[in-house]
Amino acid sequence: MKSQEELEDLREQVAETTSQIVKLVAKRDGLARRIGEIKTKGALPMESDSVEDALYRRVLQECHDLGLDERLGTKLLGMLISESKKAQGIKSGLVPITPMMMMAKAKEIESQGKALIRLDVGEPDFHPPKAVIDAVSKALYSFKTYYTVGRGIPELLSALQGYLQRKYSYRPAENQLMVTPGGRFAVYAALATALSEGDSAIVIEPNWPAYREGIDYVGAKAITLRTSLEDGWEASPEEIKESIRPNTKAIILSYPCNPTGKIISKASFKEIVGIADDAGLTVISDEIYNDYAYKPCPTILDDLPKKYVLTSSFSKAWSMTGFRVGYALAPPETVSKMLKVLGLMITCVPEFIQLGAVKALDCDKEVARNSKAIKARIEAVSKELDKIDGLEYDKPDGSIYVFPQAVDKRFDSSAFAMELIEKKGVTISPGTGFGDYPRCFRMSLGQPEAKLVAGVRKIGELLR
C-alpha cells in the first residue's frame, strides 16, 4: 500500500514538473518573439551563431553537472532554438531549384515529345557492363528473388573485400561492410547514425544537396562552409577548425566534388581528418566519383580516423544508376547501427541486383573506358567554355561535372536555366541547388561529346 502511495506521489510530481516545463517553454517563446521584434525594429541580424554556441556550451555544462545525457540536452535545445526562430519569423528563404527538380521538369517536357540536350542529370550515358546484365538475368531466371540478409549476400561482401584490397591496399573485415540501396541511402544511414536532433554537421559547399537535406531530415543543423571559384573551391583546414561548434558531431568530405570536380591534396585531406579526429567528429567520406579522378585523389582508407563512414555506389563508375546498389564501410559498431536503419526502411537490397554488382567489381576495363571518355568530354567542353567571355570556371580535377560561373554579378542561374530550356532546349542545374551560388550552374557530362559541345554553344548563344 505504501509503495502504491509513493508511486502516485511520484506520478503527480512528474505531471507537475511537466506542467512547469510547458509554462517555461511558453515563457521562452514569448521572450523569443520579443527579441524578434527588437531585431526587426533595429534592423539587426536575425541569427547569431555565437549566441547559439554559448547556449549549447551552457546546456552541455549543466548536463555534465546534473549527470544528464548530453544528447538529450542538445536535442531539447535544438527543438527550443527551432521554435524560437519560428517565433521570431526567421524563415529559411526560397526553396532552390535542385537537380531533382530540373530532372522532373526535363522528363515532363520530353514526355511531350520534345527533344532536349540533357546537361542536368548526374547520370552517365554508358551502358552497364554486359557481365552485369548477364548475371542479373541469370539470377532472375534462377529465382534469386527472395529476402536476403540486410548486410548483403556473402558473395558481394567477399567481392568488395577483394576490390578494396586491390584498389586501396585495404581489406576490411566483413563486419565493416554493408550493402545499401544506392549511395544516397548509405549517406542518409551514416547521417542518421552519427547525428541526433540538435546536433550539427559541417558541409563544404558547393556540394550535392542531399547532404544538407539529410542533415535537416534527421533534425540536425548543417554548418555550411562556403568556398569560391576565386579560392579554387577549397576550404582551408583553419576555416574548418573554426567552424566546429559545441554540438558538431560530423563532417562530410566528398572528392572529387559534385558539382565542381575539385580534388584537394592528400596532405590537406589528412589534415582535415586529423582536425575532425581531435574534435571527436565522424568523418563521412563520399567517394562515389573516385574512379573519375584525373589527379591523385585522397581516400579515407589512407589513414582511418576513429569515427568514419566511407560511402560509395555502383551508379557512376559502372553506369548502374537504376540498379540502386551501393555500399558503406565503417567500424563494426557503426555498421550495426546503420543496419538497423536499413532494416527498418528497406529490409535488403534484392539478391539478383547484388549478384550483378559482384560481376561489376571484375569489370575494370569498362570502368577505365568510361573514365577515359569522361576525361575527353571535360577537354571538349572546356575548349567550348573558353570561347564564352561571359563565363569563368576551373577545369575539373575529376567527377562528371563542370561548374561555370557568370562574370556578371547580377546573373540569376535559376532564371537562366528556365530560359535556356524554353528557348534552346538545353537543361542545366542552377547553382542555388548546391548552396548560395546564384551566378553558377552545373553541367553534367553524361551525354555524347557532340551533344555536349552543341549544348555549350547554345549556352553561349543565350549569354550574348
Image: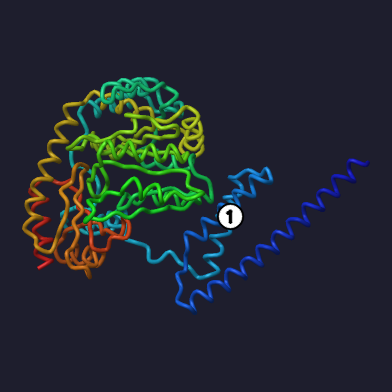
Q: Secondary structure under badge 1?
A: helix
Q: Determine the image quadrant of residue 293.
A: top left
Viewer-closest of 366 and 197: 197
Looking at this rendering, what residue extends furthest in the right direction?
Answer: 1
> Residue at position x 29%, y 54% from top?
227
Which residue is label 1 attached to? 77
> Residue at position x 34%, y 34% from top?
326
Viewer-closest of 410 and 63: 63
Quadrant of the drawing holding the C terminus: bottom left
Q: Position of residue 121 (x, y in %)?
A: 24, 50
Q: Determine the image quadrant of residue 295.
A: top left
> Residue at position x 60%, y 45% from top?
70
The amino acid type, in three-letter code, at marker 1 is: Leu
> Residue at position x 25%, y 56% from top?
429
Q: Position of residue 67 (x, y in %)?
A: 68, 43
Q: Determine the image quadrant of residue 269.
A: top left
Colour logic:
rainbow
Count all numbered tags in the image, as a single digit: 1
Viewer-closest of 4 and 249: 249
Q: Is residue 35 above or below residue 170?
A: below
